[in-house]
Image (spheres, rainbow, N blue to C red):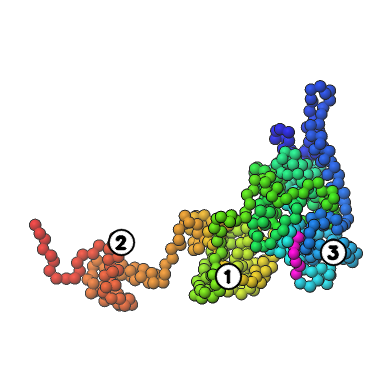
Amino acid sequence: MEGDYFLRLQRYQTPENYFREALEMQDGIPFAVQPYEELKKRFYDVMDNLKKQPKKADGAFFRMFHRKDGFFCLIRKGLERMHDIGAVPLDEIEEHLERLYKHFPEALRNNVYFTVNSYYRSLGKPRKSTFLARTARQERNIRWLNACYVDIDVGRFECEDEYLLGSKCPELLPDEVLNNKYTSERLSWEQALLQAMILEERGIIPPVSIYARSGRGIYLFWLLEPVPYHKEKTWILANYKRCNKALGDAIRGNFRDPILPGDPVAKDGARVLRIHGSRHTKSGTQVCYYPSSLEEVGQIYTLQEIMDFFGIASSKPDASRPERIIFKSAKQPFSTPKRKAGHIARMKYLIADTEKLFNARLIKKGKRYFSLRYLAAFKRYAGVPEAETITSLEQLATLCQPPYPTAREINDIPVRKIVEALYQEKGAPQLFSNAVLVDFWKIDKETAERLELQKLRPLEAGKFLTVSDKQKSIIERREALLRLEPENFSYTELLSMMKDKGYQISETTLRSDIAFLQHSGVVKRQNQKGGRPKKKHD
C-alpha cells in the first residue's frame, strides 16, 4: 500500500476503474492479482447497502446513537427556515414515531435532521402539531456525548451528468467545465466513500463505526461509549470537539485542495444531521445509514481511545497548577459597589471595538456565532435593551464573511435567538479577559492601530493613547499662543493679548506654555522684559 496513487483518487476515476488499475502481476501467478481484495469486498458491501432507499426510521436507528436516558431533537428544513419538530424522550421512541408517521408524516418525510448527542431536558409545553415539547438544542443542555462525526459534502458538479460523462466520455464535457479548477467537492458520493475507506486502510483515521449516504455526500461516525457531560465540566466537551476537529483535519489532509471536503465547522456538540429514511429533496434520494442498528455495529470507542489515536492531550485543568482565570468577579456580592460604573464603561469600550471588527468585515466563518454572542453579552452587561441589541446585531450579522445566518444552513442559529437566550441567562456580569478576546479574533498590531481599537489590543501594540478634554484645551491654548509670535513680545504684552483672545490665564501658566514651546523647538525667545541689557564680558 505504497505511493500516492493509493491515497487519492484521480479526477472522474470510478471505484471500478480504481480497482481495475490496481491489478498487478505477482511472481508465480499467471494472471493479474488484486492486492486490495479485502478493501474491494468491504467497499462494495457498504456501497450496496447505502444504495438502498429506506422509507422510514425505526426506534433501533435512534437507539444506535442514543443508548442512555434523556431526549434527542428532531428538526425539519423548510423552504425558508428550519422547523422545530420537537424533543423525543428516549424511553418513548416507538410510541412517538408510530404516531408521527401515522398522523403527521410530513414531519419525518423530507429533509429531517436529528441530534447526534442526547439532552437532559426539553423546553415548554408540547406543540399542538406534533405533541412534542420544544427542543433545548444548546451545548449546555447536553447529557450524553454519543458519537464523533465528520460531514463530507460532495456532489457539487458544475453541469448535469458531469461525473458520468467525465468517467465515460470526457470529450463530451463543455470546455469551461474541463478547464475550471477541479476540487474535491466535485466527487461523487461513491468516490468519497471509497476515499474514506482508503484513509481507514492506511490508518489515517480509525475504523469507522457507521457510514451514511446523506444525499449528495456522506457522513462518517465513530460511536462512543456514552460520555456523561455537565456544563461545569467544560474540558469534556473541549476534548470531544478536538476529536471531531482531528478527524476532519485527517480526511482533509495537508493539501490546498482537501482529499475529502469535510466541513471544518462541524465539530460542535449540538450538531444535527439527516435521519435514516428521510428524503434529500435536492438529490431526490433517501438518506441511508449502514449499519442502521446497534447490533450490526462492529466498533465502539471510548473518547480517550479517539484522543490517543490522534495524540490529543486532555483539556482537563491540572490540579497542581493554578487555574487560568478568564472571568473575574467579586468574592462576595455587593462588596464592591463602585465597580459597576467602571464595568459598564469597559463594556462600552468592548462594544465599540467589536463593532469596528464587524464593520471592517473581519468576522469570518467559524467565528460568526461566538462573535455575535460576545457582542450580545457586552451590550447586555452595558445595560442596552434587548430589542435594541437584536436590531443592532441583525444589521452587523450581514457584514460577516459570509453573511450570518448563511442561507439554508441548518446549524446557523438566528440572531434573535442568540440574543434572547443570552438575555435570559442568570448570573452576575463577568469581566472578559482582553487577552482571550484578542486571541479569539486573531487581532494583530497592524489591525489594532488601523482600526484604532482601544481595548482589544495585543501586547505588542501597547496601550491606546487618548487625549482628555483638559489636554485638548491646553493644546488649543498653546496653538493660539504660537500664532501670536511670542518671541516678539514681552510677558506682560502676551498676557494681555491672550486675555483679549478669551484665555483667562495667569502669568505662571503663560510662562509654562512658553517654556514648553521653547523646549519643543518651535519658539526661540530672547529677554522681552525691558530694561538695560546685560554687559558682555571680554
Mark 2 — residue? 520
Identity, as a three-letter code, of the amino acid under mark 3: Glu
Image: 168 above or below 117:
above
| Residue 275 spot, x, y in % from top left | 81, 56
Mark 1 — residue? 429
Residue 92 is tagged as 3
Image: 513 above or below 148:
below
| Residue 156 spot, x, y in % from top left | 75, 49
Q: Which residues are magenta?
A: 118-123
Q: Residues within 10 Å of mark 1 (few under 14, many from 20)?
A: some
Residue at 79% in and 49% down: 210
Q: Earlier in the sequence, mark 3 or mark 1?
A: 3
Identity, as a three-letter code, of the amino acid under mark 1: Pro
Residue 529 is tagged as none
Query: Viewed as shown, does residue 181 lie left or right of 508?
Result: right
**Front-most of residues 98 and 163:** 98
Q: Residues within 10 Å of mark 2 (few under 14, many from 20)?
A: few
User: Magenta stretch: residue 8 in it?
Assistant: no
| Residue 45 spot, x, y in % from top left | 85, 42
**Quadrant containing the C terminus in the rendered view:** bottom left
